[in-house]
Image (cartoon, grey):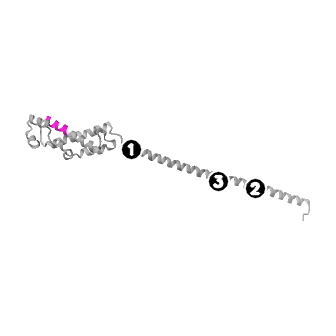
């Protein structure tokens, strides 16, 4: 079969070379298997991390929603700021003058005008307190400031309780002293 030892030596070398290549391929196979297993482990860790991150995001979203609800509740408890209360007071005062002029419909003495204005402005504040369910107009909720102003702007004499639609005894005395007889005949 083999003619000489030289051919046997070559054949042996080929077998050794084939064995080395086989060993190299086995090592490469083992390395590939290790890399594959590492990648599978990394994939699983990534999935777990993603799952934990998603859970954390859901928790953060829930906490954010709770915070928003608490903030809304808080906003609904904060009363008018100083400037807002001043602004509402200004609108109420303006409405009080408008209603006083409308109530009389003619010129009256300054004293009678001011007494009736004081009476009607109390009616305006009473209407605000009743509408916004507060004990003082300054306790209207901050988020309702513009609603309160719009409410005051739209008030009419008919919106006030009936006791504001008459002359009080003090107003009658003042009208008598100042000669506002036309008012007395019409309203007393």
Disc number for residue 73 = 1
Q: Nearer the viewer, residue 177 or 106?
A: 177
- Of the numbered discs 2 and 1, the one sitting upstream in the chain is 2
**Magenta-drawn stretch contains 117:** yes
Q: Which residues are magenta?
A: 110-119
First along the sequence among labels 1 and 3: 3
Quickly name the residue at label 3: 40
- The label nearer to you, 3 versus 2, is 3
Callout 2 secondary element? helix
In the displayed structure image, the side of residue 128 where residue 20 appears, left or right: right
Query: Within 10 angstroms of label 2, few (less than 14), some, or many (20 or more) residues?
Result: few
Measured as percent of width and height from the top left, residue 172 is found at: 11, 37
Callout 3–callout 2 Cβ contact below 8 Å: no
Callouts 1 and 3 close, C-beta under 8 Å: no
Q: Is 26 placed above or below 188 here?
A: below
Q: Is residue 84 magenta?
A: no
* Image quarter of the N terminus: bottom right
Q: Is residue 63 left or right of residue 169?
A: right
């Amino acid at each position: 079969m083999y003619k000489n030892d030289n051919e046997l030596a070559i054949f042996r070398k080929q077998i050794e070379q084939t064995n080395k290549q086989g060993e190299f391929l086995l090592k490469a196979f083992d390395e590939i298997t290790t890399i594959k297993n590492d990648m599978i482990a990394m994939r699983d860790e990534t999935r777990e991390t993603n799952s934990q991150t998603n859970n954390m995001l859901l928790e953060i979203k829930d906490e954010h929603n709770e915070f928003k609800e608490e903030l809304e509740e808080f906003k609904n408890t904060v009363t008018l700021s100083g400037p807002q209360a001043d602004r509402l007071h200004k609108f109420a005062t303006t409405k009080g003058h408008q209603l006083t002029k409308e109530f009389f419909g003619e010129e009256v003495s300054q004293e009678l005008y001011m007494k009736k204005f004081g009476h009607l402005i109390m009616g305006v504040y009473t209407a605000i307190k009743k509408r916004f369910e507060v004990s003082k107009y300054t306790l209207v909720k901050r988020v309702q400031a513009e609603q309160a102003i719009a409410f005051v702007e739209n008030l009419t004499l008919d919106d006030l309780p009936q006791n504001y639609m008459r002359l009080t005894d003090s107003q009658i005395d003042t009208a008598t002293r100042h000669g506002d007889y036309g008012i007395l005949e019409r309203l007393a």
